[in-house]
Amino acid sequence: MTLSPLKWWQSGIIYQVYPRSFQDSGHDGVGDLKGVTSRLGYLESLGVTAVWLSPIFTSPMKDFGYDVADYKNIDPLFGSLDDFDELVREAHGRGLKVMLDFVPNHSSDEHEWFKEARSSRDNPKRDWYMWRDPAADGGLPNNWKSFFGGDAWTFDAHTGQYYLHQFVSGQPELNWANPEVRREMADTLRFWMRRGVDGFRVDVFWLLAKDPDYRDEPRNPEWRPGQPEHNSLLHVYTQDLPVTHGYVAEMRSALDEFEDRMMVGEIYLPIDRLLTYAGTPEAPECHMPFNFHLILTPWNAADVRNLVDEYDAAVTASGSWPNWVLGNHDQHRFATRVGRPQYRVAQTLLLTLRGTPTVYYGDEIGMEDGSIPPERVVDPAALGQPDVAAAGRDPERTPMQWDATPHAGFTHVGAEPWLPVAENFTAVNVAAQEADPGSDLNYFRALTKLRQGSAALTAGSYRSLDTGTGTPMQQGATALTGGSFQNVRPGTGVFGFVREAGEERVLVLLNFGAEDAVLNLPELEGAQLLLSSHAGASSGVLRGNEAQLWRVG
Ligand code: NOJ
């Protein structure tokens, strides 16, 4: 099999840069575009294919750029349109694709459209947003909640109506039922594609449509006090409404006016609902609906295997293309979630599964959540929560750890980084790991090199091995039916699978437990070791927390 029929976003690896935290070229403690451009050589050395930049547009930064005040300009904090053009030019010169973060569901309340909309009830832009009269008793129009806590409505005293926002009040929801809004958004995509942008990550795609009757959402019977308030409702009138598919298909048509562009949609839904956002061959929607299920699934071999089997089968049946994510700017760092010992197992899984991997900046060196003192918390999702330090997304957004100098080389020594650098930066940083052939960084590079050079790993089929998953494993060495593994620890286990394209077959073995596992696999006979997470790998034994890749005959 050759790779040529695959598009770049299928065979490639996406790398997410959170620009505020990547590299500051100035002295203000906030990363910027020139900073990213200066690090393109590093990105190239990682063997990734595309760089996705979290929002860089003009914004008052109430939600750190996910509140856009001008969709066609760059925020001065990050630089200028010229800086952006230079970044695209330089990236393309190195063979890297550039993806932007597109935020169509809501703008900033400082966007000119919203300023006009709120100026009077009969302003032509009024209907670009979602306005409702107060209830008969003068209260809220309905019971809808914000993801960040509290109600989804803010009263505008000047015009006597409430406007809808599912995040902070500075993020009024655009009215996607209005064709003018949709036209403007499609035009925005064209604006950036003309500037050379190769693709888009689209924010909260499954939230675009709302119930035209604004009905109350039913209570979630499983919700318990203390859990996020947003979860107290079943979101049947604000999420995944059928009409959304038409909106997504319209955006797709705009993309298809240009050659070889793509969009990946942020969608948190069960697998069967998620895959509907890929559309059909006749009416295509997202090139890839983001698959976040690895983040949401308990970290053990049985559950992960079940997930991968289920997702792979569903993707195959739907004729769409798979993808996998382990981390992003909204989720705790995966090295923290799965625990340090399992870090390489997780990284190996991400980079060997069938489907496009998305890597979050810093995960290639094993960055962990930073600890943020309460007075440094800035995430709007955390502010106002009872335990600000525990809530929120600042811990996974700390500055990139480049070296062991003050501020980890992220910003000028005299500047204050916008978030504190994680404490472990003197040990965990790029410079230290460059120098160490056995480092996480070089392990990551070895994985991307193997993947990028292998038809089996990029394009091949997936087949999991029968490890007896689903039957409880017992304490003590247990020969499992199917004859594949002996496993010595319950609840953790070994996950093994084969990727195959033409003559090439790669066996991936992942030990989710801390104990050694003895393997009795026919596939291992005459197999050639490609890579192991631990030095000195041997055939037939998978040490605790070890990942192995084998070329099999
Ligand atoms: C999803 C983004 O990933 C998150 O960071 C943001 O706060 C919300 N959408 C609102 O745009």
Image (cartoon, grey):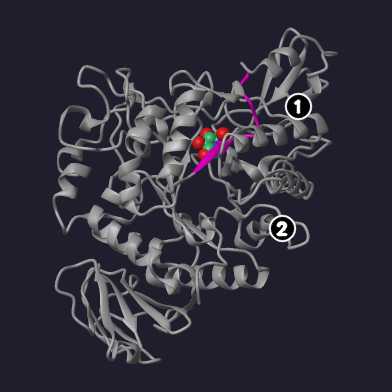
Residue marked by disc 2: 279
| Identity, as a three-letter code, of the amino acid under mark 1 | Met
Where is residue 502 shown, x and y percent of the image? 48, 82
SS for tag 1? loop
Question: Could you tell whether 397 is left or right of 297 in the image?
Answer: left
Q: Which residue lies furthest to the top in this view?
A: 158
The residue drawn where x is 83% and y is 37% is 212
Regarding residue 173, the answer to whether it shows in the image is yes
Say which of 187 and 63 sits in front: 187
Q: Residues within 10 Å of mark 1 (few under 14, many from 20)?
A: many
| Relative to 524, residue 31 above or below | above
Q: Quadrant of residue 272?
A: bottom right
The residue drawn where x is 33% and y is 17% is 28
As measured in the structure, the alpha-carbon distance from the residue carrying label 1 to the one carrying label 2 is 27 Å
Question: Could you tell whether 368 is left or right of 321 in the image?
Answer: left
Q: Which residue lies furthest to the front in this view?
A: 93
Where is residue 34 shown, x and y percent of the image? 38, 28
| Identity, as a three-letter code, of the amino acid under mark 2 | Gly
Marking on residue 339: none
Residue marked by disc 1: 130
Query: Which one is in front in this view, the residue at disc 1 or the one at disc 2?
Result: 2
Where is residue 528 shown, x and y percent of the image? 26, 82
Of the four image quadrants, the one with ligand 1 is top right
| Relative to 108, residue 525 above or below | below
Q: Which span is picked out in magenta?
A: 98-109
The residue drawn where x is 56% and y is 59% is 7
